[in-house]
Image: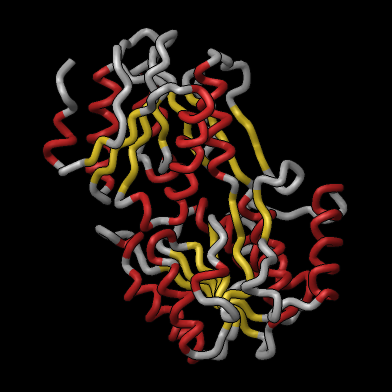
Amino acid sequence: MRIPIIIMFFLSAVLLCSSNVSADTDEFNPVLVYQGPIDENSFTVSIHKGVERFKKKTGDDCTEVVIGTTVEDYVTAITQFAEEGYSPIFLLYGNHFPDLVTFARKYPATRFIILDTVRDEPNIYSFVLADHEGSFLAGALAAMASKSGKLGFVSVVDTPFQRRFLCGYTQGAKYINPDIEVLKGFIGNYENAWFDGNATSRLANQMMDEGADVIYQAAGGAGPAVLEACAARGKLGIGVDINQNGLYPGSVLTSMVKQTDKAIYAALMLAKRGIWRDNYKRLGLEQEAVGIVFDEHNKGLVTPEMRSRIENIRKKIVLGEILVNEDTENPPCPNNVK
């Protein structure tokens, strides 16, 4: 087998290589392709944790590759591995993949596992984490903590996937205070945008200039800069993906954590066992796959009463007494933000 050309072209780092690659889908030869350094993006940190857990549990290897951050880099790498016969191929950024269905149909013998995107194809398997449910809790807590009545939301690319975070956050905030204002901002889609902390920091500062005193960032590697900007001005930030409360203790109100590692681990275990019965799995508050964090770093920011209210809200969402809208194309989400 020849070494994938993409690795040499984009100075990719192959962390661990599986052997005996075959186009036969009965062969378990998984590959995950990361855009940008793993340890500089909270999203990929969680994914890698799931891979490490799988390897420790099974003793199996798994190919992990780091490439550049452009869409072209990503599509080229995925195409290369599909041609090489890897399966399953994890599309960690499936929501950014152009013409995903058309691409998957070119490789009917290859199984694709995607995160947070649903496509009705026989060889595509979706694991969707209910970001909007966890973000609802983050928004509710932000509204409880806000003194100005203005919140902020900072992200990178304006896509339906990113708007799920905004949608849930806005609904949660307005559940507590119907009159609260939510400022939103996306820095844009360009090379290395997901690592452009200068841009997210500027956006956060603009929001604080307009009166926002709690800002939620869903911005990958560009997100910690938002927390830093909030801390520098005595405001509160909200982390995402993993627990970021300890980055700026006393200035991070909470973190909306996603147990992406558990989804990756489950997907790998099912794939290894050849279990492909269900093309769609949804994981939310009920499965404890999303939520917000309380620890020693935000203890002084969250009162017992606030925690009790959040727990009551969480239970109501799980029981279906509160329905969190994830449809970003219709109200209430777009009409509730400025």
Say whether residue 188 is visible: yes
Depth check, front residue: 139 or 267: 267
Point out residue 150 in the picture as x, y percentages from the top left corner: 63, 84
Residue 214 as seen in the image, left or right of residue 121: right
Point out residue 121 in the picture as x, y percentages from the top left corner: 50, 23
When asked about the image quadrant of residue 135, the answer is bottom right
Say whether residue 102 is visible: no
Point out residue 84 in the picture as x, y percentages from the top left corner: 25, 19
Depth check, front residue: 93 or 184: 93
State the residue at coordinates (57%, 17%): 276
Point out residue 223 in the picture as x, y percentages from the top left corner: 44, 67
Task: Assign the C terminus to one quadrant of the image.
Answer: bottom right
State whether residue 126 is above or below residue 205: above
Residue 4 as seen in the image, left or right of residue 39: left
State the residue at coordinates (50%, 22%): 58
State whether residue 289 is above or below residue 194: above
